[in-house]
Amino acid sequence: MIYDEDFELLELSEDQVEQLIYDLVGTTLNLDQYLESTFDVPSVDYLSEDTLEDIDRTIFLCESCGWWCYDEDRSENGYEDICDECAEDEE
Ligand SMILES: [Zn+2]
């Protein structure tokens, strides 16, 4: 998809961000696909920075198992975004 400079970045409301987080956590959904089917936004590139920050602060995609997890379950290993469960498996 070609980025259209005139396209206004979408700022999701708090409720929408909450909904997104609720829908994603515990799944392996592709964020772009979710955004397209739920908010009719073709990809994360169309979300405002504030919205992305809100999402980023709360959840992350584990690079090891590919599941969306709450930020508090992020492992402290420091070099990759993986969840506590995956970090335990690696030890
Ligand atoms: Zn994981």
Image: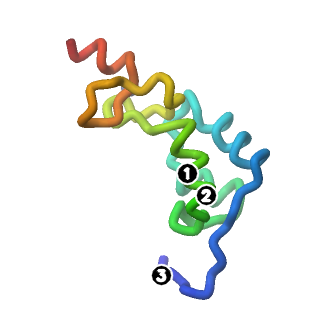
At 30% from the left edge and 12% from the top edge, which residue is drawn? 88
**Amino acid at dot 2:** Asp
As helix, strand or loop, the secondary structure at mark 1 comes to helix
Return the disc, 2 or 3, that comes first in the chain's sequence.
Answer: 3
**Residue 30 image position (x, y, % from top left):** 50, 48
> Real-space Cα distance between discs 1 and 3?
23 Å
- Which residue is labeled 2 in the image? 50
Instruction: Tell me whether circle 1 and circle 2 mark residues in contact (CB < 8 Å).
Output: yes
**Amino acid at dot 1:** Glu
Q: Residues within 10 Å of mark 1 (few under 14, many from 20)?
A: few
> Real-space Cα distance between discs 2 and 3?
22 Å
**Amino acid at dot 3:** Ile
The label shown at residue 53 is 1
> Real-space Cα distance between discs 1 and 2?
5 Å
Residue 33 lies, with reference to residue 17, above or below; the image says below
- Which residue is labeled 3 in the image? 2
Report whether the residue tagged 1 is closer than 8 Å to ligand 1: no
Report whether the residue tagged 2 is closer than 8 Å to ligand 1: no
Residue 45 appears left or right of 62: right
**Residue 68 image position (x, y, % from top left):** 50, 34
Instruction: Tell me whether circle 2 and circle 3 mark residues in contact (CB < 8 Å).
Output: no
Residue 48 lies, with reference to residue 61, above or below; the image says below
**Residue 69 image position (x, y, % from top left):** 50, 29
Return the disc, 1 or 3, that comes first in the chain's sequence.
Answer: 3
At 57% from the left edge and 37% from the top edge, which residue is drawn? 58
At 54% from the left edge and 63% from the top edge, which residue is drawn? 43
When asked about the image quadrant of residue 82, the answer is top left
At 61% from the left edge and 58% from the top edge, which residue is drawn? 50
Q: Quadrant of ligand 1?
A: top left
Q: Dividing the image into 4 quarters, which one contains the C terminus?
A: top left
As helix, strand or loop, the secondary structure at mark 3 comes to loop
Q: Residues within 10 Å of mark 3 (few under 14, many from 20)?
A: few
